[in-house]
């Protein structure tokens, strides 16, 4: 290598380090005055999950949300009792039924943490998270992309609407720390929405260990979806096509005629765990089940979406199908959450009966192979 080439390479590395230091410093310094939002003007336009509607809530939302809040209030005491008697409660059929009915918002974080065994992991790994946070200042090569994604993740949510605000800082730190903790994955787009959802119900360190559990546990195994080459995603994509061929052959044939391939819609569904693809209220119900049941929910929910909308899909061309999958379903799914979850449980039973609730075993390793945190 010539002297000029060496110097050019050194300058490039130096600029990259300066950029990384500048990004980290902004999150250290916190909220910029110019980035603050006057939430007082938007109080009447916040829905029950904290999303901001500048022109008021969509028609009928107030009545629907009041009804749901009242249902949750009645069920919350039962959940609080179950949490206090966790060892006895978490094994019964009643617990499963209540998971499918939805975990009340005021105990969702507690229940997720229990199911994911976060408290025990945090105690066993005492000090590790802060060590990973410190290490990102020198080691992470993903800082720039993480910063870009943090700035566009849930910006219409009150928790993440302020640039360099408390939750944006937490989201940045969780993703940056994980990028040096799990070096095989590092960081990949889609992870920011998952971490942000955890941060809505868990504190910063618990969100980190929740993310780690989702990626590395036998039951969830997100690791294989995000490592280079996305081996698990491709395996699940092939399995989705097999499901359509068996249970919805006419829809699959219609998709083929219109050149609508699973690769056009499944990446957003699977790599973002359906976040941003269906209404947020439904996402929470799905995530309650996903955290409890594990990865088999993905195949069932993809099948469920197409099954519920099969008649509409058969009348659509390729552009209309993609519009439905990419944007329309999030705005208006067409069915209320209880109906969707009931149909999801039916789809899961159908797949289980056909021994298709999970795809065939992986031919390549999809699990972590390197030690964490090195």
Image (cartoon, rainbow, N blue to C red):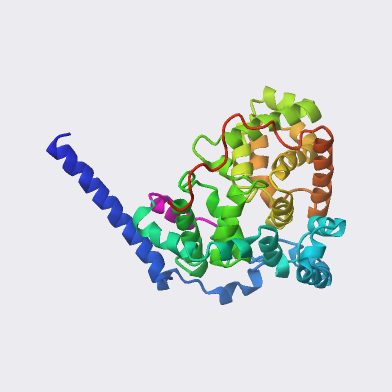
x, y (%) of residue 95?
82, 59
Where 227 sits versus 44, above or below? Answer: above
Where 363 sits versus 106, above or below? Answer: above
Residue 145 counted in the magenta span:
yes
**Stretch in magenta:** 141-153
Residue visible at 56% across and 57% down in the picture: 195
Whether residue 125 is visible = yes
Where 42 sits versus 320, above or below? Answer: below
Residue visible at 80% across and 50% down in the picture: 341
x, y (%) of residue 374?
42, 51
Residue visible at 67% across and 50% down in the picture: 330
- Please give left or right for residue 264 compared with residue 73 in the image: left
Residue visible at 21% across and 47% down in the picture: 11
Residue 108 counted in the magenta span:
no
Q: 152 or 119: which is nearer to us?
A: 119
Identify the residue at the far left of this view. Answer: 3
């Amino acid at each position: 290598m010539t002297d000029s080439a060496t110097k050019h390479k050194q300058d490039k590395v130096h600029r990259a380090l300066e950029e990384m230091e500048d990004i980290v410093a902004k999150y250290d310094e916190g909220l910029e005055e110019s980035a603050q939002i006057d939430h007082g003007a938007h109080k009447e336009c916040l829905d029950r999950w904290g999303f901001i509607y500048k022109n008021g809530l969509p028609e009928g939302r107030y009545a629907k949300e009041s009804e749901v809040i009242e249902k949750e209030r009645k069920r919350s005491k039962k959940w609080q009792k179950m949490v206090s008697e966790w060892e006895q409660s978490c094994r019964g059929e009643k617990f499963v039924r209540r998971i499918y009915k939805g975990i009340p918002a005021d105990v969702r974080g507690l229940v997720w943490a229990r199911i994911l065994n976060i408290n025990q992991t945090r105690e066993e790994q005492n000090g590790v998270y802060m060590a990973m946070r410190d290490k990102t200042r020198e080691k992470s090569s993903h800082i720039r992309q993480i910063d870009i994604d943090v700035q566009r993740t849930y910006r219409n949510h009150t928790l993440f609407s302020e640039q360099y605000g408390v939750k944006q800082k937490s989201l940045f730190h969780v993703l940056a720390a994980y990028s040096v903790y799990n070096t095989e994955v590092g960081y990949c787009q889609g992870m920011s929405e998952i971490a942000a959802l955890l941060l809505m119900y868990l504190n910063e360190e618990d969100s980190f260990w929740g993310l780690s559990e989702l990626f590395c546990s036998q039951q969830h195994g997100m690791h294989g979806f995000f490592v280079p080459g996305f081996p698990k995603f491709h395996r699940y994509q092939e399995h989705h096509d097999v499901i359509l061929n068996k249970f919805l052959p006419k829809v699959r044939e219609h998709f083929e005629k219109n050149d609508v391939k699973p690769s056009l819609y499944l990446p957003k569904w699977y790599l973002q765990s359906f976040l941003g693809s269906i209404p947020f209220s439904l996402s929470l119900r799905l995530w309650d089940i996903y955290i409890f049941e594990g990865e088999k929910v993905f195949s069932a929910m993809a099948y469920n979406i197409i099954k519920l909308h099969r008649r509409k899909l058969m009348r659509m061309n390729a552009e209309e199908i993609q519009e439905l999958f990419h944007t329309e379903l999030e705005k208006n799914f067409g069915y209320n959450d209880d109906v969707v979850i009931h149909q999801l449980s039916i789809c899961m039973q159908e797949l289980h009966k056909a021994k298709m609730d999970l795809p065939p075993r992986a031919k390549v390793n999809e699990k972590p192979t390197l030690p964490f945190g090195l």
